[in-house]
Structures are given as structure tokens and as C-alpha cells.
Image (tube, rainbow, N blue to C red):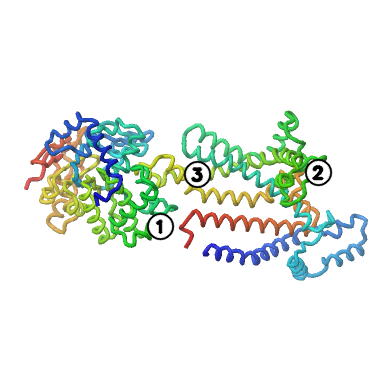
Amino acid sequence: MAVVRYIAGRLAFLIPQIIGIVLVSFLLIKAVPGDPATLMLGPMATPQTIAELRAQLGLDKPLPVQFLIYVDKLAHGNLGTSWQTTRPVLDDLRVRFPATLELVTYGMLLALVIGIPLGVASALGKRGPLAKLGGFYGLVAGALPDFWLALILIYIFYSLLGWVASPIGRIDVTVTTPHMITGFYTVDSLLTGNWEAFRSSVHHLILPVLTLGLVNAGPILKMTQATMERTLEADFSLYGRLCGLPEKLVIRRAFRNALPSVITIVSVLYGFLIGGAVLIEIVFSWGGAGQYAVQGVLNSDFNPVLGFVIFSALFSLVVYLIVDLIYLAIDPRIRR
Amino acid sequence: MTEAMPGEPRSLVTRASIRQGNPGSVGRASAASEGPAVIEVRDLEVAYYVYGAEPTRALRNVSVRLRPGEILGLVGESGAGKTTLARAIMRVVPPPGRIERGEIFFMGTDLGAMGDAELGRLRGRDLAMIVANPRGELNPLLRIGPQIATIAEVHLGVSRKRGLEMALDMLRAVAIPDPERRLRAYPHELSGGMAQRIVIAMALICSPRFVISDDATSGLDVTVQAQVLDLLRKLVREQNTSMLYITRDIGVAANFCDRVDIIYKGEIVEDAPTEAFFSGPAHPYGNLLFAAFSHDAELRRRWMGSAPSPEGDAAEAPCLYADRCVKRQARCLAEHPALRERAAGRLVRCHFPVER
């Protein structure tokens, strides 16, 4: 019951949080120089037509009024229209956000699969070869730019070996995209039994996911290792050994005590990558949300940018809520 | 209490086999006519290796012997080697420490000859340890019940359900109020005194032959400490467990122990039955400790001064206490004293033991 109240309390804060985020990003994007009307009409436009379009778009009104108009539309589920795609931002994001989410989710999963075992192994064999490998890996993963690694991987696995599909888009152009249910091509194609689409989307995911996974396993590895080293040396672990508990049990308990820190870094990375994977999206022409937002910023296309900010803010807030619930389940000390 | 302990038949079998395991050394150990030793430490040397420096000798030639049911107080200041001895007996000397020399026998069996798996089976079951800072020793994420029960499950092979029942019995034995509810509590919900009792329950759940209490009660309020000590003594007597009680507080040792060993710079300097020791320590350092806890102004004046100015240079191996000893003489700087028997059952490491 307390948990339900806790969730309700957190959700009640969601709306003011969103309004605050929208306000800040609205002001920031308005502070960026650039006039959408000028860009939309091109170099041949007369000042008069520009002024007319500005009036039509509501850009001539004072900033607070513009903000209230935006919030009013937002309250009705209208995120406005992108002048670049000429489609409602909501429709664009419905396709593009899952595209990014799919990429980032698989990337995070791979990062976990690499980072946690290597981190635990490094913590266990402090001066052993695995610890050295872990230390070296952490250093390299921190030093390599992800887009550069992506290009190297493309060169090796596509150009030289030809093992994967061409690094353009989420699926082969010749394959029909699966009917949209979740927006994850891999999931939707499985749900609709579209094997061809499944195969193709997996092929397209391999390299970008590999890039994200390899780069982001670094911080996860470091965090797992550092925390595990601490919990393995903690008094309760030493006392467990003194009580003759098997080493396996001591390690398992130490890992459990290390989990909160690992989950923290994962949640931070996950939220960050929604926008932070944009270079990968560009390299692989992914057509994701990050790319969409960057195009918006470059072309003074405000609505996609604000829409992206709202979407990723909501996503982050949900991730943090889930993380807090996990903490609550793991650590009794915060239940008070 | 004793007959209520489940798993007892099984551990008795093991104990019998341990007793028969190495009859030769038992025979040798019991030559002193006091019955077989539960723990016998012989000529133990432990050193800490620090890179680029001479290794620090934490224990020098330490021999300690505990009869069944005996409570031996080990008293000394911080850094004297008390905890190192405790860890060495449990064979968990933390790196960079190393056991250089000496043997440790448990019920006549050489612990040094045992493998890790075998030692792991002994630790927590027959060799238990009660530590200070009890809240740090408990896993903050696990409930009390399972933490205690796991030890019984691991060592006695009982089920989780039986383990929890035994844990409940132990909580009652250590006089924790409302024990059913405490089983489901987390460590942070307990007071320091309560957490200390939990650690005692964990240490004693398998009815060990031998318990080390490493400065375990010094963090408690004086009244709580007295309660916990009474409880500890009662449990130890009921189970006929031997105990090495490590403390800096000589007053507690006086009330609690059967025999007292004074340790200074890694050396045992005095070994005496409690009553004999407190009617008059023989070693100057024992007298200093005694005086420090006493209200007798005359006694304090006599023992708490500084050492007289040097009479010649220190030889290669002087008495380790010489630089602090108020009774120092020329011989103390020249020659390291041996641990000698001064009266029946009283050993002292001093050229000029205090006569009374």
C-alpha cells in the first residue's frame, strides 16, 4: 500500500516537472538565433511575406503568450507541426522515438552483458589478468568516440567481411516494415510473424548496438568493479567469511549490495543515450528521435525540438521512477 | 539450552572425529596436566610486510592455551597484536600479514595443515568470532532472521525453516525482546546493543567449541555492556565453550575472565589467573594497566611516570618495554627477558618482576 502511495505521489509531481522542463526548453530554443519564417520561405521571400507568415505562426506575439499557446495545445495532446516534414510532431515522434528506444535498449542490454561480468571478475581477481583486461577496457571504452568506432565496425564487418546488412536505416528498403504495434521492429515483426522483417531488422541492429554496447560497457564495468571491490571488503563480507559462509554466497551477497550503484549508472546512461546516441543515428541513417531533434535545432524548427524534449523527459522520469522502485525493493534502509 | 540445540548429534560426531584425528599432538598438549586444550597456539610469529621497509613483527613467539570452558582475557593497548592473534587463530590474517612461524591446534588438530574448505567448515561452527562494530558486520540489505539462519543452514545442514526456528531460539537466548518481530527486522532498525546481541547469536548458533570476542562490547554503553557480558558468560558456561576475550579494558577482564594474558608489542608479558593478577600484577606493564584503572593516587604515581634516563645504549635485543618502564635497569637494555614461571600458573616476562 505504501508503495502505491509512493508511486501516486511521484506521478503527481510529473505534471509540474513537465511544465518546468517545457518552460526552460521553450525559453532556450527561443534564445537560439534563427527565424523559421525566413528559413521556410527561402532567400527570395519579401519582408512582407515573412511578416505575414510570422503572424500566421504566432511568432509576432510576446513570448509569454507564445508559451501559453504552446502549453494550451500541449494540454490537448497537440505538439504542433514540423515545417520540415510538414507532419504533426506527435506522428513523427511516434515512429522515431521507438526507433531510438529500440537501438538504445539493445545497446544498454549488451553493455550490461559485457560490463557487469567483467566488472565482477575484475573485482574478484584484483591483480589477475581479468582485472587488467577490465582496466584496459575501461580506459579504451572511455577514450574511443562512438561514431569513430561505428565507422571502424562498418569498415570491418560490412566493407571487408560483408557479414551484416548495409548500414543504412533500420531495415532493408526491399522489405516491408512490420505493422506498428510497439514501434520496435524486432518485436513487431515477431508479433506479426513477419520473419523476413525480423531477420532484416536484426541485421541492421547489429552494428549500431555493438557500438553502443562496447562504448557504454566502460562506465558500467568501472562502476561494478569499484562497488564490488568495496562490498567484498566490507565488514559484513569479512564477517561472513569468518562465520564460514561459502565464498560463493559471500560474493553473491556482495553483488547484491553493489547493485544499487550499478542500477544508478545504468539509469543515467539510459536516459542520456536517448539524445546521446544521435551520432550513431547519423552514422547509420537510423531516422531516430535524436536525429529528428538535431535537424529541428539546426533549422529553427521549434516544435520537433520541444516534442523531443518532452518525450525524453517523460522517458527519463519513468526510468527514474522504476529505478527508485527497484531501490525500494533492494534496500530496506530507504523505506522509511 | 543445550538440549534444545538442534543439529547437535551431527556436530558431536564431527567433534569426536576431530578429537581422534590427531591423538599424538593431543597427548603432547595435555602434558601440562590441565586436561586437553581446545585451542593451543605455539610460538606464533606474524609479520606485516610493507613494501620497501622492514616487516613489522605483529606477534612474537606467542603461545596461548585454552582449556574447555575457560575464559581467557587478552589485554593490551591498540596495536599490541590482539586482533592479529584473533585473526591468526581463525587463519584469516589480512594481507600484507603473514604467519611466519608457529602452530595453532584446535582440539589437537593443526589448523595450518587444513585446506580452505576444511577451515571454512570449522569457522562459524567450532571456531566463532564476535566482533566490534556489530552494525557494520551485519549485511544491511538482509533481514536478521535469514542472516542468522544461514549460518546454521551452511554448517549443520538444516532447512531454512529449521534455521529460522534456531535463530528464534538464539534471539530468546540473547534476551532480545519481541524476538519474532526482530527476526524480520533489518540491521538499521536495531540499536547498537541489540545488534551486538545479534552478532553473539550468530557466533553461538552452532554451539562452537571456541569463541573469540574481539573488543566486542567496548562500543556499548556501560550498563548495556554489563548486560551483554553477563549473557555472554551464561551462554558460554552453558555450552562449555572456551573463549578468548580480547579487550583494552582491564576492569572488564577482572570481572569476566578466568585467566588474564597481558600482551605488549606482540609479546605475551604476563599470564596469570585473574585473582592472582589482580591481587598484584608481576610485570611493570601489568602494573601500569592496573594503576591506570585504579583510583589509588599512590599507585598511579608509582607506575604512571616516564622511564628513567638511559643507562647506556640499548643492545640489539632489549626488553621491548624498556623504553617505557619506570623500573628499568641496565640489564633491561642489554638483554631480552624470557617468559618465566614465577609461581604456579603465573608466567612473567621481566628481569625484575614486582614482588609483593
Q: Is residue B232 left or right of A172 when viewed as pictured?
A: left
* Image spot of residue B261 (x, y percent): 19, 44
Residue bearing the label numbered 1: B184
**Whether residue A325 is situated above or below residue B205 in the rendered picture:** below
**Whether residue A2 is situated above or below residue B214 in the rendered picture:** below
Q: Which mark is residue A226?
A: 3
Q: Amino acid at mark 3?
A: Ala
Q: Which mark is residue A132?
A: none
What residue sits 69% from the left and 47% below the top?
Answer: A102
Q: Chain of mark 3?
A: A
Which is nearer the N-term, disc 2 or disc 3? 2
Question: A6 or B188: nearer the eye?
Answer: A6
Q: Is residue A295 left or right of B333 when viewed as pictured?
A: right
Residue bearing the label numbered 2: A176
Q: Amino acid at mark 2?
A: Thr
Q: Chain of mark 1?
A: B
